[in-house]
């Protein structure tokens, strides 16, 4: 009887070497070791809420399966935080730590650190939250040949608003849309932010850019000019368009602010240039569109007087609908882009706190 030869396949684990392997900046290809207690990384909360200017801790802890120990003790622990993007092949570096070596990146420099409340705590502290910090973050812990990850979403309290410039409807390519939002104390909104705004009642029939490069618009009351009267409510999706050549409006997102938004009491109505100077004389600046929306939505600001804003538009915020002042709904009412030199209105100002 012929002898039977049994071939046993043995799993091999290794890490592809790099020169200067101790550098925090080098990428590594990790091959997971299958034997022994498995390294686990856990986020105690999947979603964290904060606001602009606040401080937040993104939770992340690591340990070995079936043990209470944080690490094996034979390898240094490397912790890396990155921010996920709409392009799943790209991540933005935020913070890396290994032993006494620590490094933060980009606009996170000086604002991020590890909490380190225990030997297995890899939680990330972010201070002075910015609008751009909104999004999903990945905590990755590496020990020798083992690694694991957890994802935490950082949500910001705020408001989404549609925006189009003086030129009128559908005049912004994607890059111009980003700049337009920044100019109005806001950032271009994400799909999740637009979706949450739609669930809260936002209804807008003009399509606008979102941060992932898609063009969409929210409809709560279906009607003929907006996709059809017999369609279901929802966020309508035009898909992804050429960021340089295609032109649409934009949906912006802003949060609370560190300052005072107010209507300037003045004895006369003003041209645009007079309005700018009146705010400066009062120790403030003419307010931006994002600031009037934040004051209206987050502070309940209500004023039935139309006033100039920094982009040359005239608007007024109504949080308590009433006769002659947006009788049907709470909203920031849009008067238009009047002639700056000849039309007279009041003005909304903003004074930042130090």
Image (tube, grey):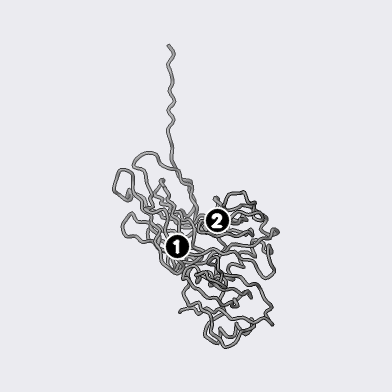
Q: Give the label, 2 or 1, closer to the camera.
A: 2
Which residue is most to the top?
1
Residue closer to the observer: 326 or 219: 326
Left/right placement of residue 341 relative to residue 2 reads: right
Neighbor class of circle 1 (other Cα within 10 Å; few <14, some 14-19, many 20+) is some
Q: Which mark, by number, is residue 191?
A: 2
Q: Is residue 22 visible?
A: no
Percent from the top left, x then y, of residue 142? 41, 50
Residue closer to the observer: 200 or 182: 200
Residue tagged by mark 1? 103
Position of the N terminus, as image quadrant, is top left
For residue 125, above or below residue 39: below
Percent from the top left, x then y, of residue 233? 57, 52
For residue 266, above or below residue 76: below
Percent from the top left, x then y, of residue 91? 52, 55
Neighbor class of circle 2 (other Cα within 10 Å; few <14, some 14-19, many 20+) is many
Residue closer to the observer: 219 or 146: 219
Label 2: state its secondary structure.
helix
Percent from the top left, x then y, of residue 35? 37, 39
Q: Earlier in the sequence, mark 2 or mark 1?
A: 1
Q: Is residue 324 visible?
A: yes
Which quadrant holds residue 56? Answer: bottom left
- Kindly report the distance in space between the C-alpha atoms of the residues bearing marks 2 and 1: 31 Å
Label 1: state its secondary structure.
strand
Which residue appears at 38% of the width and 49% of the height?
41
Which quadrant holds residue 278? Answer: bottom right
Position of the C terminus, as image quadrant, is bottom left
Q: Which mark, by number, is residue 300?
A: none
For residue 217, above or below residue 68: below
């Amino acid at each position: 009887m012929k002898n039977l030869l049994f071939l046993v396949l043995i799993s091999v684990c290794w890490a592809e070497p790099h020169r200067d392997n101790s550098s925090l900046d080098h990428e590594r290809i990790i091959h997971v070791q299958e034997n022994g207690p498995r390294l686990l990384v856990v986020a105690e909360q999947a979603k964290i809420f904060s606001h602009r200017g606040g401080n937040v801790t993104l939770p992340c802890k690591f340990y070995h399966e079936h043990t209470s120990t944080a690490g094996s003790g034979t390898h240094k622990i490397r912790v890396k935080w990155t921010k996920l993007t709409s392009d799943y092949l790209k991540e933005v570096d935020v913070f890396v730590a290994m032993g006494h070596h620590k490094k933060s990146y980009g606009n996170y420099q000086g604002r991020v650190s590890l909490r380190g409340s225990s030997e297995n705590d890899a939680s990330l502290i972010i201070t002075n939250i910015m609008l751009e910090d909104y999004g999903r973050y990945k905590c990755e812990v590496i020990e020798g040949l083992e690694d694991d990850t957890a994802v935490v979403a950082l949500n910001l309290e705020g408001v989404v608003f549609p925006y189009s410039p003086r030129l009128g409807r559908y005049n912004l390519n994607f890059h111009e849309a980003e700049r337009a939002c920044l100019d109005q104390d806001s950032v271009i909104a994400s799909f999740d932010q637009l979706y949450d705004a739609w669930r809260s009642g936002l209804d807008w029939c003009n399509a606008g850019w979102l941060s992932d490069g898609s063009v969409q618009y929210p409809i709560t009351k279906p009607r003929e000019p907006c996709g059809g009267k017999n369609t279901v409510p929802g966020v309508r999706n035009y898909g992804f368009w050429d960021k340089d050549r295609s032109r649409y409006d934009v949906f912006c997102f802003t949060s609370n602010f560190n300052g005072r938004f107010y209507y300037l009491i003045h004895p006369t109505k003003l041209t645009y240039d007079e309005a700018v100077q009146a705010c400066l004389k009062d120790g403030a600046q003419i307010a931006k569109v994002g600031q009037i929306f934040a004051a209206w939505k987050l502070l309940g600001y209500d004023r039935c007087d139309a006033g100039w804003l920094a982009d040359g538009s005239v608007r007024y915020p109504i949080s308590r609908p009433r006769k002659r002042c947006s009788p049907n709904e709470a909203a920031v009412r849009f008067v238009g882009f009047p002639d700056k030199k000849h039309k007279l209105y009041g003005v909304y100002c903003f004074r930042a706190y130090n």
